[in-house]
């Protein structure tokens, strides 16, 4: 490695940037989104651009807990938690120069929940009674039931306010051939799977309070360049072909930290968790003992250390223990690595090792099938888990599918185990996504069908006080952890590698979009 | 001349039909339910049914094929499953970069290959000849991705001479040229070998011909003979070679574009196939096959112009 | 997608000499060396399960070990380990096996079908125009395009790649076999055989096939290297062999993630492909020179 270090030191003098174009940066990233219509995609890649292209009523501070101003300068919530009144900022304009009013907010929210739009994320808006513009600057958001998550959900890119005329003009091509929002950057061009170019919104002046710069942005142009290969992204940062990226492989982080003129920023409240889930009603993994044994058999610490170079936090909980409403009573009960216990548990439950070491019970072999995404990270992860399980006599079989096919495959009942990673803002956000029975077969791919969970989730959602909400979600967390419905693998922190020509970037974590609105991106003077 | 053209056009009809069948099969035989993929995993069954109807998936194969041909004729290749852009617009955006890459590759590799081949022929059996032959054997034996990786490692990372990500702009801009340098170098390196080899053998052949011998005996000096008679006649097979090697170049371009994240047709096809984007994959294959037919047609015509004997055959 | 000499043209009217061509071949030192290299590689690949020092599929905790000659190298892993701590030498042996298998199956299948078609169309003149028209159409689909199309239909895998490469080999071999066979058919002994009442079948297998086989061999040996290259390229792109199987192109592709820190992971399998193809090409050229001295330069 010393040779590498020497090389990095020697070559970090930026030679490749070409004629330095004044205020432009290129951000390299791994994958593109399928589109940039806030209501028609759940991709992180879309959120990354949408946060820059548009604004939401309220925004989230980097601590992932505090909700602050956005397009609304302030808001009130009624006693019963049913009516939210938002007061909009003055002088907000779309990129096409038109002034934004309460009507635009109403239009955007209604399009989000309109069954015609068929948005996969409409549930995030809560059970809406109606959304009305009281006047040009006031929006009233009325709910049928209280929804304690609402403000958090409204900070997501799905709640971006969009320009009605553009939506109607572009029709099916909205978010594909063009987009108009009120964000600090405007859409210039998008060539799928190649790059997206954003230019500065010159009149922007309504950035959220936690940004020192309220607008306009310092940078004139941001290019999001797709580079699928890990190594090429790393080298792009080192050679100055890209100024910043959050997609550096763990293997390169330490090297980059030691490279002159390159910094790595880290945030530990990223709330992005990798796990494998079990279909609780399929033979073999329907046995709670098997699921617990799997949890005991896998050494998350070794995984984090060897496979991911110690750059991630081994996970034993299904959401980060730092997330809002995490149940601290569970801290001591989490299943940790203990392969001997796993073996004796399986022995006791009647799963006896066969001739090839794989256990069986009543003629059923312990060979669950796992579906995972093709690609280097899940290949490594699943093969690691496979090897660990084999040591205690569980013969997991892996089938990898390419991203698009995978989503369809994961909606079926063909598999026993699936691999997944996901972002969340809070425990409630995570639980409401994965565990309600009406979310079967997807995203509730575990077939976790439990009336009490449903009730508790409803109670958490409609809770009027923080304590009630935390209590309800706490109980759900307890239930699902006790049943070992998942095998948590690791929590991934947010890393941003950047050139030191830029001011230090503070990573944001909303939906894993590290640059958020990009208002603080700035070259040093 | 016109005869050749007409004959060539006529000959390409069965090929075109073959291409269409291939494109159609691609959508038909692909695993999974196209309507379901299009609708997304979360869509309710009614929506999937609507889409199925829209795509004509519930009608007979024959009807579907004609529908397909009709749509292709109108330039309607559907929309990409992944980006939801029209396939036509994605293809159009990718064709120019690929053509630029081809030009940037051929413009230096063909002259160099011809030069090397001629020298090898003139000094037949010499050290130069052997070096050229060794170089060309090595050139056709190197996996193109290895060349790309080596160039990135040295020219891109170590010496930091050229960028190696994406396209900088049109070919006539400085950034465009800087970005295309390494991909064009990689692709050219695998093409010099065949060109040099072909030039060498055809120059050797030509030098043996009667009129060249006569010229020599008339007292013209060697370089004049080679330039005036040898090389010009030797160019004919080289033109054919470009046609014959179009497939070879195409394969090289697919790899090169992918490694350099260069937004051409090759990278688009690989991406489309890997993400099971059937409409786009089908469109890419149609365009590639069509390009291949057109290149061969142009080569045939050039051949006819350069060598009038062909017409009489 | 042949990258070497214009083969069709060269073979048009040559009845290959029948002699102890092995001896002649081995007299060419470069060719002998290439042939020996190729055979040893093939042997090593064949014996992979016996001679591989480690399990090629199982990862270990020592990831990205450099080869033995480098700083920090280690005799346990002669060529080092990859990003998952798997022994590169063992993977190389298994990978060569799969790479060679793809090449041999593709060329073998394609050339067999193609040659049969070519010979038959020379033998039975009435099917000739159909076969040749078919070959013309097929020629319009270069191997890489067929590969892309078949993988698009069936999904990535070694099998679709083999099928595609075989199909791509059919038209060329059909044309070559036909042009040779037409020459053979004009020979007097075919007429004589017909006159004494030999069956079509005997004529075909005893005279036609036997007299055409060496020309087909030339074609196969020249084509082999190219097919290996295309197969490896497809695997490199993720369209060919699937993990966890080891294949040289795929190994190079997986090594790309570690280029900055451990370039040997990508370079070693790439060099292996180069050596195999180079040896195959040199051998192929030599076989052609020996079997067909007229082409010797």
Image (spheres, helix red, strand yellow):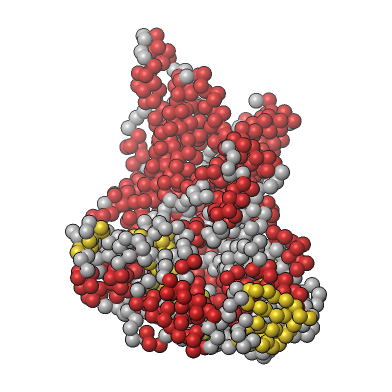
Q: Please determine whether, in this image, residue B38 is positioned above or below residue C289.
A: below
Q: Is residue B124 visible?
A: no
The location of residue A92, given as percent across then percent down, is: 77, 81
For the C terminus of chain A, the image quarter is bottom right
Residue name at image x 40 percent, y 88 percent:
A328
The location of residue B160, given as percent across then percent down, is: 57, 72
Quadrant housing residue C67: bottom left
Q: Please determine whether, in this image, residue A498 is positioned above or below residue A107.
A: below
Q: Outermost residue toward the right?
A: A98
Quadrant housing residue A373: bottom left
Q: Give whichever of A257, B244 is nearer the camera.
A: A257
Q: Is residue A45 left or right of residue A488?
A: right
Q: Is residue C118 visible?
A: yes
Quadrant housing residue C75: bottom left
Q: Please determine whether, in this image, residue A489 is positioned above or below residue B287.
A: below
Q: Is residue C76 left or right of residue A469?
A: left
Q: Please determine whether, in this image, residue C30 is positioned above or below residue B255.
A: above
Q: Give whichever of B153, C95 is nearer the camera.
A: C95
The location of residue C1, given as percent across then percent down, is: 52, 43
Q: Is residue B304 left or right of residue B146?
A: right
For the N terminus of chain A, the image quarter is bottom left
Residue name at image x 58 percent, y 44 percent:
B57
């Amino acid at each position: 490695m010393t040779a590498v270090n020497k090389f990095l030191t020697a070559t970090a003098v930026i030679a490749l940037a070409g004629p330095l174009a004044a205020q432009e940066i290129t951000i390299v990233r791994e994958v593109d989104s399928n589109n940039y219509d806030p209501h028609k995609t759940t991709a992180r890649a879309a959120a990354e651009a949408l946060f820059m292209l548009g604004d939401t009523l309220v925004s989230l501070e980097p601590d992932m807990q505090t909700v602050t101003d956005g397009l609304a300068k302030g808001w009130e919530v009624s006693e019963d938690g049913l009516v939210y009144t938002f007061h909009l900022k003055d002088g907000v304009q779309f990129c096409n120069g038109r002034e934004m009013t309460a009507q635009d907010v109403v239009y955007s929210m209604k399009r989000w929940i309109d069954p015609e739009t068929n948005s996969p994320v409409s549930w995030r808006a809560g059970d809406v009674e109606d959304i009305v513009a009281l006047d040009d600057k006031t929006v009233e958001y009325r709910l049928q039931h209280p929804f304690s998550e609402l403000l958090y959900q409204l900070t997501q890119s799905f709640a971006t306010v969009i320009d009605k005329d553009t939506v109607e003009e572009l029709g099916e091509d909205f978010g594909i051939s063009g987009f108009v929002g009120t964000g600090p950057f405007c859409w210039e061009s998008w060539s799928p799977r190649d790059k997206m170019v954003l230019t500065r919104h010159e009149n922007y002046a309504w950035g959220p309070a936690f940004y020192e710069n309220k607008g306009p942005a310092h940078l004139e142009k941001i290019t999001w360049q797709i580079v699928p290969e890990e190594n090429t992204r790393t080298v792009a940062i080192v050679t100055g072909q890209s100024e910043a990226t959050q997609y550096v492989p763990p293997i390169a982080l330490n090297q980059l930290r030691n490279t002159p003129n390159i910094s790595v920023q880290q945030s530990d409240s990223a709330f992005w968790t990798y796990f494998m889930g079990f279909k609780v009603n399929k033979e073999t993994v329907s046995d709670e003992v098997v699921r617990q044994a799997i949890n005991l058999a896998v050494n998350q610490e070794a995984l984090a250390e060897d496979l991911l170079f110690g750059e991630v936090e081994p996970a034993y909980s299904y959401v980060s223990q730092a997330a809002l409403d995490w149940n601290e009573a569970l801290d001591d009960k989490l299943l940790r690595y203990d392969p001997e216990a796993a073996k004796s548990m399986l022995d006791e439950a009647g799963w006896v090792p066969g001739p090839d070491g794989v256990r069986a019970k009543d003629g059923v072999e312990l060979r669950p099938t796992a579906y995972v995404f093709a690609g280097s990270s899940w290949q490594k992860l699943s093969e690691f888990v496979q090897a660990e399980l084999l040591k205690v006599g569980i013969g997991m079989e892996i089938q990898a599918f390419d991203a698009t096919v995978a989503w369809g495959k994961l909606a079926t009942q063909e598999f026993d185990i699936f691999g997944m990673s996901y972002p969340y803002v809070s425990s409630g956000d995570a639980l409401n996504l994965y565990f309600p029975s009406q979310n079967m077969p997807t995203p509730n791919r575990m077939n976790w069908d439990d009336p009490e969970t449903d009730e508790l989730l409803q109670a958490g959602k409609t809770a009027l006080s923080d304590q009630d909400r935390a209590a309800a979600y706490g109980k759900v967390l307890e239930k699902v952890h006790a049943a070992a419905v998942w095998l948590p693998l690791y929590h991934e922190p947010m890393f941003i590698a950047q050139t030191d020509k830029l001011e230090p970037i503070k990573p944001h974590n909303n939906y894993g979009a590290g640059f958020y609105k990009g208002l603080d991106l700035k070259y040093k003077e | 001349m016109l005869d050749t053209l007409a004959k060539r056009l006529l000959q390409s009809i069965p090929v075109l039909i073959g291409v269409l069948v291939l494109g159609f099969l691609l959508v038909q035989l692909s695993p999974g339910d196209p309507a379901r993929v299009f609708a997304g995993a979360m869509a309710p069954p009614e929506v999937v049914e609507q889409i199925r109807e829209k795509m004509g998936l519930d009608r007979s194969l024959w009807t579907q094929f004609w529908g397909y041909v009709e749509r292709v004729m109108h330039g309607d290749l559907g929309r990409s499953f992944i980006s939801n852009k029209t396939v036509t617009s994605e293809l159009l955006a990718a064709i120019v970069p690929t053509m630029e890459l081809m030009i940037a590759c051929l413009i230096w590799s063909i002259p160099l290959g011809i030069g090397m081949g001629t020298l090898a022929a003139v000094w037949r059996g010499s050290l130069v000849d052997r070096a050229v032959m060794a170089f060309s054997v090595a050139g056709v034996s190197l996996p193109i991705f290895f060349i790309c990786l080596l160039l990135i490692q040295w020219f891109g990372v170590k010496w930091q001479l050229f960028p190696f990500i994406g396209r900088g702009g049109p070919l006539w801009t400085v950034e465009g040229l800087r970005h295309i340098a390494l991909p064009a170098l990689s692709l050219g390196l695998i093409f010099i070998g065949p060109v040099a080899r072909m030039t060498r053998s055809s120059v050797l052949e030509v030098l043996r011909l009667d009129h060249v011998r006569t010229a020599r005996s008339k007292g013209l000096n060697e370089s004049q003979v080679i330039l005036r008679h040898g090389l010009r006649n030797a160019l004919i097979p080289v033109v054919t070679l470009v046609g014959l090697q179009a497939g070879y170049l195409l394969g090289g371009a697919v790899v090169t574009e992918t490694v350099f994240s260069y937004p051409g047709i090759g990278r688009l096809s690989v991406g489309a196939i890997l993400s099971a984007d059937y409409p786009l994959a089908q469109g890419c294959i149609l365009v590639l096959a069509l390009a291949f037919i057109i290149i061969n047609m142009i080569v045939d015509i050039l051949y006819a112009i350069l060598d009038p004997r062909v017409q009489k055959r | 997608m042949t990258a070497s000499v214009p083969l069709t043209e060269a073979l048009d009217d040559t009845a290959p000499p029948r002699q102890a061509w092995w001896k002649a071949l081995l007299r060419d030192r470069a060719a002998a060396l290439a042939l020996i290299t190729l055979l040893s590689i093939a042997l090593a690949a064949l014996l992979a399960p016996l001679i591989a020092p480690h399990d090629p599929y199982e990862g270990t905790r020592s990831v990205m070990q450099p080869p033995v000659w480098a700083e920090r190298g280690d005799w346990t892993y002669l060529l080092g380990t990859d990003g998952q701590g798997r022994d590169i030498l063992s993977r190389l042996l298994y990978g060569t096996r799969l790479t060679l298998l793809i090449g041999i199956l593709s060329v073998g299948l394609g050339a067999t079908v193609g040659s049969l078609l070519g010979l038959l169309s020379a033998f039975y003149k009435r099917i000739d125009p159909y076969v040749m028209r078919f070959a013309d159409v097929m020629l319009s689909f270069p191997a890489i395009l067929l590969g892309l199309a078949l993988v698009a239909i069936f999904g990535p895998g070694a099998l679709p790649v083999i099928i595609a490469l075989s199909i791509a080999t059919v038209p060329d071999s059909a044309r070559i076999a036909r042009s040779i066979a037409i020459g053979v058919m004009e020979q007097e002994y075919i007429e004589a055989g017909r006159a004494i009442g030999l069956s079509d079948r005997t004529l075909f297998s005893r005279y036609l096939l036997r007299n055409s086989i060496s020309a087909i061999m030339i074609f196969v040996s020249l084509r082999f290297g190219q097919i290996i290259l295309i197969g490896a390229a497809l695997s490199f792109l993720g369209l060919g062999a699937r993990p966890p199987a080891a294949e040289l192109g795929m190994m190079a592709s997986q090594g790309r993630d570690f280029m900055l820190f451990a370039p040997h992971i990508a370079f070693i399998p790439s060099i292996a492909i180069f050596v195999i193809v180079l040896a195959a090409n040199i051998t192929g050229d030599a076989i052609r020179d020996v079997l067909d001295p007229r082409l010797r330069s």
